[in-house]
Amino acid sequence: MQLNPGQRLRSASSEAEVIVIRAPKGEVHLTCAGAPMIPFEQAQAAGAAAPADAPPLLIGKRYCDEEGTLELLCTRGGAGPLAAGSRELAVKAAKPLPASD
Amino acid sequence: MNILTLLEIVAAADGDRVALGDRDTGLTYAGLLDLAARTARRLDGGEGTVLYATTASPAFPAALFAAAWTGRPFAPLSYRLAGDPLRRLIAAQAPALLVAGRAVLDLAAEVPGVTGTGPDDLLRTAATMPPTETAAPQDPEAPAVLLHTSGTTGTPKVAVLRHRHLTSYVLESTELLSAAPDEAALVSVPPYHIAGVAGLLTGIYSGRRIVQLPNFEAAEWVRLAREQHVTHAMVVPTMLARIVEVLRADGGGLPALRHLSYGGGRMPRPVIERALELLPGVDFVNGYGLTETTSSIAVLTPQDHRDAVASADPRVRRRLESVGRPLPAVEIEVRDSGGRPVPQGSAGELWVRGPQVSGEYAHASHLEEGGWFRTRDGGWIDEDGYVYVEGRLDDVIVRGGENLSPGEIENALIAHPDVAEAAVFGVPDEQWGEVVAAAVVPRPGARVSAEDLREWVAARLRSSRVPALIDVRDSLPRNEMGKLLRRVLRAHLRPAPRP
């Protein structure tokens, strides 16, 4: 699907929800726990379940591709992983900064 | 992404944590989201900007997030402005809903397209309404906050901060719920200051309880910090100077305080050194940023402060005068007046770019090619990447072709034991083009002589920096945020005929 910053998506098979922070031009085949992600407004199909050993996505973490052109913020935790095509997205390393305002 | 999403995430992750106010009776994140949803319902059907021209209270975040929820820009205004200028700023934003106290509402009563409500009335009517059922729009390009720049050198401009600027700043500088449950931040900068807006958003996203002080007064700040066990605070330099005086006088200290950040103007080195001495257990952070850059673009960390204080190396020690290094997503470069990069270590104008940099005023982007924003601040960057800000380029004194920055001369003057405050500026001179002038406020009960101060500066700085004119005054002219108004001093001090 075509992704746009601000777009909200949910996993088809787990509790996970994300919001698009940065998106590349063109189509992205975005999956969560192995199933294509669905629009936020769409309800999950009945009986969908993520594999029991699926790695969790954590609320507040950002997930990126290697090039940094795709970035998603996890707004609700749930089973992952997130992947674009065949490539898994990684947690963006946190660079904690002291509060300045 | 909409700035409201930041609050939604925190409310979903830890809704029972206290977001605002007293640690026992304050508003929780879930409560604040609910209040914003009801306030959004109250705003339904209206159009245009949500103007907020009053002090900080729960109505400030409620109105900010309700505006974001309904896709309307939020514009905090200085309620301290005089009648006519404030009415003009309000009229320029019509159509609008104006949230303000009685005096400002009366002032704007006749302005076409503007409807008014008091902050308490806004919350009271919102509380009687059901939460909105409409989802917030998710256009990252939509204007979220319109801020008037302080305009110390001219007419204020309206900086446009879009949702993407604010959310980038929060996500790049803050981790979700990274604050411990006992942390509390005392916010005493007003809602119309960029640090008031940015501090609210980063405070919420990090899960740090916010204690609002509507009108800064140093003794009240100290009292509230002690009563509310405040662990974090942000102050502008004039506030810190006054807090230091209160603490010195009462000797009580601030036992809960762990973290004090300062910004919004040049910090005189003697003030920060006194504060470091008086509050030895506190982490100090210097943040440098502009309204147009969505708050901080560089920070001097607590470790930087400790290293500087402990070091015998003058290169490390002088970092107390720097604003630290750029944020990870921000680039800062030094360029000459023609926009060409200058050699490492040379002074010039600071240029900045990054996802949080707006550089945009109402109706016009001021970004240069490549997304760079010219700060109009002079400065330089040392070999370790520490940024030194010398002040507004308009304030640089050009004496006989030599560029002098007021800051170092002010530091020398303030270091004098009888001097409380000093401001340095250029005045026209037939021989030199400009000469150095200084306005000096003596400490209470002290007397200073111009001759004595000239000798003091001459013993510390090169002779070109010695003020030719010295004006001893009771106070310095400042705007309501404590920013020095050099143009007022310049107009007051006419150059004397040369002997």
Image (spheres, coloured by chain):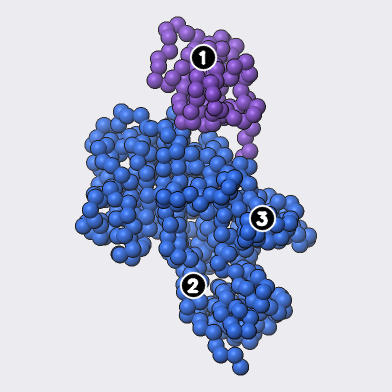
Chain colours: A purple, B blue
- Mark 2 and mark 3: Cα distance apart in space: 29 Å
Say which quarter of the image contains residue B401.
bottom right
Q: Dot 3 surroundings within 10 Å: few (below 14), some, or many (20 or more)?
A: few
Residue placed under numbered mark 2 in the picture: B487
How far from the left and from the top, in percent, is residue B455? 68, 83
Q: Give the residue at x 60% y 53%.
A: B351
Q: Is residue B236 visible?
A: yes
Could you tell me which secondary element the residue under label 1 belongs to? strand
Could you tell me how many numbered marks the image carries? 3
Tell which circle, 2 or 3, labels the residue nearer the N-terminal end.
3
Q: Give the residue at x 48% y 69%.
A: B485
How far from the left and from the top, in percent, is residue B22? 41, 45
Q: Give amino acid for label 1.
A: Pro
Report the disc number at residue B340. Answer: 3
Q: Give the residue at x 26% y 41%.
A: B46
* Residue B353 in the image: above or below residue B375: above
- Mark 1 and mark 2: Cα distance apart in space: 62 Å
Q: Dot 2 surroundings within 10 Å: few (below 14), some, or many (20 or more)?
A: some
Could you tell me which secondary element the residue under label 3 belongs to? loop
Q: Residue furthest bottom?
A: B499
Q: Residue furthest left?
A: B110
* Relative side of B102 to A58, left or right: left
Check if mark 1 and mark 3 are on a common chain: no
* Residue B498 in the image: above or below residue B40: below
**Residue contact between numbered discs 2 and 3, judged by CB atoms under 8 Å:** no
Q: Give amino acid for label 3.
A: Arg
Question: Which-is-in-front pick, marks 2 and 3?
Answer: 3
Residue placed under numbered mark 1 in the picture: A36
